[in-house]
Amino acid sequence: MKIFAAVMILALPALSLPSFAATEQQNRMGTCNKEAADRKGDERKAFMKECLSKPKVSPARKAQQDKMKSCNADAKGKTGDERKQFMSDCLKKPA
């Protein structure tokens, strides 16, 4: 009986429930839920559906995408190595 009690005491930490960090979707749900606080019924459902389906883009990634679009537009008419060099130089410039 003493051995069983000793084994149970040693096993208790292993039996405790692990704590899980919130997933990105759970974090997004919390954010959307706060934004939808003043909405009710179908309006709330529509808002939540739209909010949860939006792709999450970080500000840094958005800036990089905008820079790519701008450089790409400026590179019109250039081809081959000339275009590669132009794009490289353009993307290295600070915003």
Image: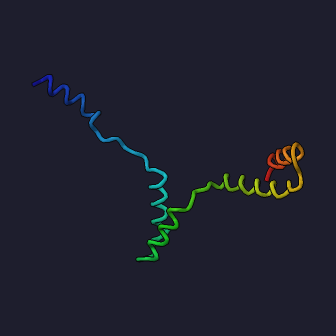
Viewer-closest of 82 and 12: 82
Classify 85 as above or below 73: above
Q: On the image, which quarter does residue 1 sit in?
A: top left
Looking at the image, which residue is at 72% across and 52% down? 64
Looking at the image, which residue is at 47% across and 55% down? 25
Number of marks drawn: 0
Q: Residue 85: where, in percent of width, then height?
A: 86, 44
Left or right: residue 17 compared with residue 62: left
Looking at the image, which residue is at 86% across and 47% down? 83
Left or right: residue 62 compared with residue 79: left
Classify 28 as above or below 14: below
Q: On the image, which quarter does residue 74 sit in?
A: bottom right
Left or right: residue 2 compared with residue 18: left
Q: Residue 33: where, in percent of width, then height?
A: 45, 65
Looking at the image, which residue is at 18% across and 25% down? 6
Display colour scheme: rainbow
Viewer-closest of 44 and 17: 44
Q: Quadrant of the C terminus?
A: bottom right
Q: On the image, which quarter does residue 84 sit in?
A: top right
- As drawn, the residue found furthest toward the left would be 1
